[in-house]
Amino acid sequence: MIRLFVDADLGAGARIAPRPDQAHYLTRVMRLAQGEPLLVFNGRHGEWRARLAEATRRGCVLALEERVRGQEAPPDLELIVALVKRARLETIVEKAAELGARRVRLAITERTNADHTNVARLEAIAIEAAEQTGRLDAPQVLAPAPLAAILAGWDAGRRLMFCDEAGDASPAIIALRQAGGAGWAVLIGPEGGFSPGERAAIRALPQVTAVSLGPRVLRADTAAIAALALWQSALGDWRGLEVGGAAGQVTVDRRTPDSLNQR
């Protein structure tokens, strides 16, 4: 069934008007007919069954019927990633959403080789990934900020998983389980790695847990995916999953590469 992320408040009997691009997606791309059901969520009020009540050339109206899932908070996990080339950054944001990150914070480092990005497009990618994966919220994507400023304002109660390339860190799964805790951020550097000064500043934070992602040098997008998966396995909502049954089911994404452009 189609899932749609909306900004409006949700409640029994409410009627909401999706954005024009969403209306186009529902009625022209997916060819949803009047009276057909879909699911909507907004990150605040759970997931609701709705039906297409009206459709015109200018838009459509959805009528909400009943709540099918209460709101659940994802693990308190943030991804901080240095700006990289557009295609890789878009992959990182999409996979961060699929892997359950609450937010993605973009960082500018000394070796960053990209000086700008389209945050609005990244937000759209994160929302579409949330719709596809069944999560009840869409991760925030925060505008780029200097890494030094991010570290200077660090929350004393929040731990930081530093994926260190120097080779003197413990394996991630072991280090994370030893560290424990609930609120975490994962830090991924640029394609050229962190400078010696940046690495020293990161390691100096008392909240930092330096980890190794294995014997191979990984690209930024691969490192982000691996790090998030390891965190979820050690401390997040992957703990206790068993192969087979509802907990072990895998959802296959059959979207076409042009689906974002269609919306």
Image: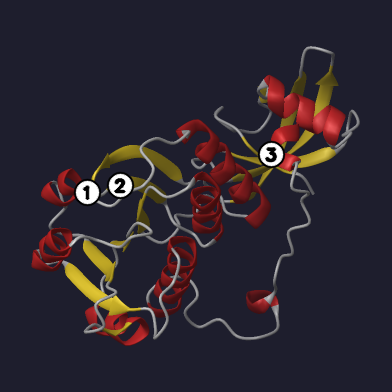
Q: Is residue 39 visible?
A: no
Mark 1 touching mark 2, by CB under 8 A? yes
**According to the image, label 2 marks what residue?**
107
Q: Position of residue 190 (x, y in %)?
A: 35, 56
Q: In the rendered view, tell whether residue 177 sits above or below residue 257.
A: below
**According to the image, label 3 marks what residue?**
260
Ranked by sequence position, the earlier of labels 3 and 1 is: 1
Tell me how many marks there are: 3
Q: In the rendered view, tell whether residue 246 sits above or below residue 114.
A: below
Ranked by sequence position, the earlier of labels 1 and 2 is: 2
Lateral position of residue 25 relative to residue 223, left or right: right
Q: Marks 1 and 2, Cα distance to the nearest angstrom?
A: 5 Å
**In this view, the mark in front (3 or 1):** 1
Mark 3 touching mark 2, by CB under 8 A? no
Label 2: how many Cα within 10 Å (few below 14, some 14–19, many 20+): many
Q: In the rendered view, tell whether residue 93 sits above or below residue 50.
A: below
> In percent of the image, x 23 and y 50: which residue is there?
110
Give SS at disc 3: helix
Q: Position of residue 34 (x, y in %)?
A: 89, 28
Tag of residue 53: none
Ranked by sequence position, the earlier of labels 3 and 2 is: 2
**According to the image, label 1 marks what residue?**
147
The amino acid marked with disc number 2 is Ala
Lateral position of residue 66 relative to residue 238, left or right: right
Give 102 or 121, whichever is nearer the viewer. 121
> In percent of the image, x 73 and y 59: which residue is there?
253
Q: Marks 3 and 2, Cα distance to the nearest angstrom?
A: 25 Å
Which of the 4 quarters of the picture holds residue 59? top right
The amino acid marked with disc number 3 is Leu
